[in-house]
Amino acid sequence: KNEGKKIKLIYTIPTGQNPSGATMSIDKRRHLLEIASKYDLLIIEDMAYNYVVLEGSSPPTIKSFDREDRVIPIGTLSKIMGTGFRVGWVVATDLIKKYVVSEKQPIDYCAPAISQYIAIEFLRRGVHKISIERSREVYRIKRDVMIRSIEEKIRGAEFSKPVAGMFLMLRLPNVDGTLFAENLMEKYKVAVLPGKPFYTDDKGRDMIRLNFSRPSIDDIKEAVDKIGVLYRELKS
Ligand SMILES: Cc1ncc(COP(=O)(O)O)c(C=O)c1O
C-alpha cells in the first residue's frame, strides 16, 4: 500500500491451516468476504485440509457465502490420495480458468498424466471416501497422542489444539526456533520446521511446526520427548 500498489487478492487456508493448524471461525469467514467485497478483492480459498477435519463437521466454506463470484476455491488430492501425485483442482469462471491455464502451462505443462489417471480411478471407485474417513480417525488419535505428550514432557510450551489438518505450531518461549530445529535434527534426528519463515514479521521466531500425520504413534512420543529434552538443555 505504501508503494502505491493495489491489493487484488487474498490467499487463505481457512480450515486446518498450514503451518498454524488454525481453523477460521464462521464469523471470520463472513467478515473476510465482506472485506473482499468492500475493496473489490478476489479470495483464493485453499481447501487442502477441508477433508482432514478431525472434530465435528467441516465448517462452511467461504465460497458458500459468496454471491459475487469473488471466491476461487482450490484444492489438492495430496492430502487424501497421497503426497507427490500433484493433482489439484480449481473452481473458477471461464475468465479465471483461462488465466490459470496460461500461467500454469509454462510452469509444468500439466500435472503428470499418470497421476491424473490414478486420481480419476481413486475418485471413480470411491476410494477417497474410505481414505478420508480413515485418515480423520488416525490423525485424530495421533494428534491426541502428540498433545498429551507435549503436556507431559514440555513444560512451558504453548500451542492450540488443531481441529483440522495435520500440523501443530509449538511456541517454545525464549528459544530461537530456527536454531532449535537445526539442533534437534543434528542431535536427536527429529525433523521439525522452524516457525520464522512462515511469518512476514518476527512472530514465529520462537515457534516450531510439528506434523502428526506421517510419524507413527511411537515416533511421535519419542520425538516430543526429545523436543522436551532439548528445550530443557537450552533453557538451563
Ligand atoms: C495449503 C496447501 N495447499 C497445497 C499443498 C500442496 O499441494 P500439492 O501436493 O497438490 O502441490 C499443500 C502441501 O503442503 C498445502 O499445505
Image (tube, helix red, strand yellow):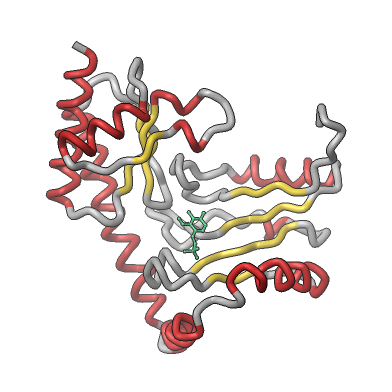
- For the C terminus, the quadrant is top left
List x then y, in percent, for residue 192.
31, 41
Q: Where is residue 65 in the image (x, y as percent from the top left)?
A: 72, 56
**In this rendering, position of residue 31 left or right of residue 208:** right
Residue 81, by quadrant, is bottom left
In terms of depth relative to the viewer, which is nearer, 204 or 33? Answer: 204
Give residue 135's position: percent from left, percent from top: 32, 64
**Looking at the image, is 230 positioned above or below residue 169?**
above
Residue at 56% over, 43% down: 24
The residue lying at 39 percent from left, 66 percent from top is: 83
Q: Is residue 60 above or below residue 18?
A: below
Q: Where is residue 88 in the image (x, y as percent from the top left)?
A: 55, 70
Instruction: Check the picture and name the quadrant holding the N terminus.
Output: top right
Q: In this view, does 207 lie above or below 35?
A: above
Query: Is 174 positioned to the left or the right of 19 in the image?
Result: left
Q: At 61% across and 46% down in the image, what residue appears? A: 26
Q: Based on the displayed image, in which of its 4 quarters is residue 92 positioned?
A: bottom right
